[in-house]
Image (cartoon, grey):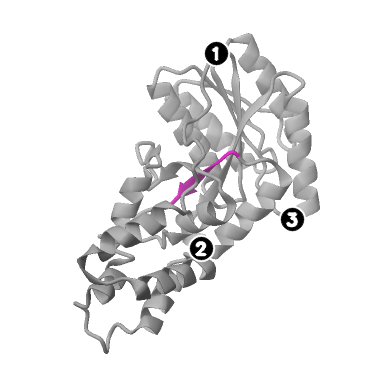
Amino acid sequence: MGLFNRLVAKVRGTSTASALDWSEIEAELLASDLGPSLVSELIIAAKKMRGDDAEEAIREILRTKFSQKSRALTQGSGLHIVLVVGVNGTGKTTSVAKLATYLHADKRSVVLGAADTFRAAAVAQLTTWGERIGVETISGKEGAEPASVAFDSAKRALDVNAEYLLIDTAGRLHNKSALMDELGKVKRVVEKVAPVSEVLLVIDATTGQNGLAQAKIFSEAVEVSGLIVTKLDGSARGGVALAIESALDIPIKFIGTGEAAADFAPFDPEKYLEGLLT
């Protein structure tokens, strides 16, 4: 990504002054979706820096902006229920499938719950992925109540002694009140069978500050325990990942970098920083 290489060059005094004045660098950082508060803090700190230690100093500042909460997916004995939430178009259903692939490859037993019942394509997509991976997908009739499908999924996962149940929830963001009601109902109904262990929010890195706004709304609707950030590759303005962690203290647990099942991995903050700085 190389987001900060011009800032580092400016602090070191190796940049061309006319091409790299502070306002231009600030505009560039804002365009990367870091957000105004974080950019302002970085610019103020950078102006006080001197010499060749600039890169490490900036790296240390950025490290403090990451959440200190665990990035590991919940583990241990019994069934772990993971609700995957997010607006339509972020890659939510695909992320559920990729997470199932990741867990299945790690020899974990998985059941999928296709509770995004308002999109027949989502149910069909998840069912196809499940068949491809070799895991069971629980679904209802088209337009079925999402909470009902989630409940049936939880019962089935418990019956087959699965380690993980991944539930794909409806991605409609029509208004905050309806979102809270819908997600709250799914969670309450599922917990009649077993507790929800995780709520993972899927954010598309290319949506920029809109992704941060989505994270805030979902955090108010349901207790989000972690993020899956999709499209976090060289072409994405990936600063939003750091902006969300800094603003909301929600850890990124997984990232998606492409369409293939293999383009999915646990989030590595140091690797991410390396991409921003080189």
Q: Nearer the viewer, mark 3 or mark 1?
A: 1
For the point 22% across and 84% down, the residue is 16
> What is the distance, in whole Å, between disc 1 and disc 2 at their CAs?
38 Å
* Residue density around tag 3, few if under 14, some if 14–19, many if 20 or more, within 10 Å: few
Mark sitting earlier along the chain (2/3): 3
Give the labeled residue for mark 2. 208
Q: Nearer the viewer, mark 1 or mark 2?
A: 1
Element type at marker 2?
loop
Does residue 221 sit above or below 8 in this rendering?
above
Task: Check residue 24 for magenta coloring.
Answer: no
Please name the amino acid that badge 3 sits on: His
Quadrant for residue 23, please give it: bottom left
Please name the amino acid that badge 2 sits on: Gly
The C terminus lies in quadrant = bottom left
- Is residue 144 visible from the viewing direction of this image? no
> What is the distance, in whole Å, between disc 2 and disc 3 at their CAs?
20 Å
Mark sitting earlier along the chain (3/1): 1
Which span is picked out in magenta? 225-230
**Going by the image, does 251 lie left or right of 146?**
left
Magenta part mainly helix, strand or loop?
strand
In the rendering, which numbered label is found on residue 174?
3
Give the labeled residue for mark 1. 77
> What is the distance, in whole Å, between disc 3 and disc 1 at their CAs?
37 Å
For the point 40% across and 42% down, the residue is 267
Please name the amino acid that badge 1 sits on: Ser
Q: Position of residue 175 (x, y in %)?
A: 76, 56
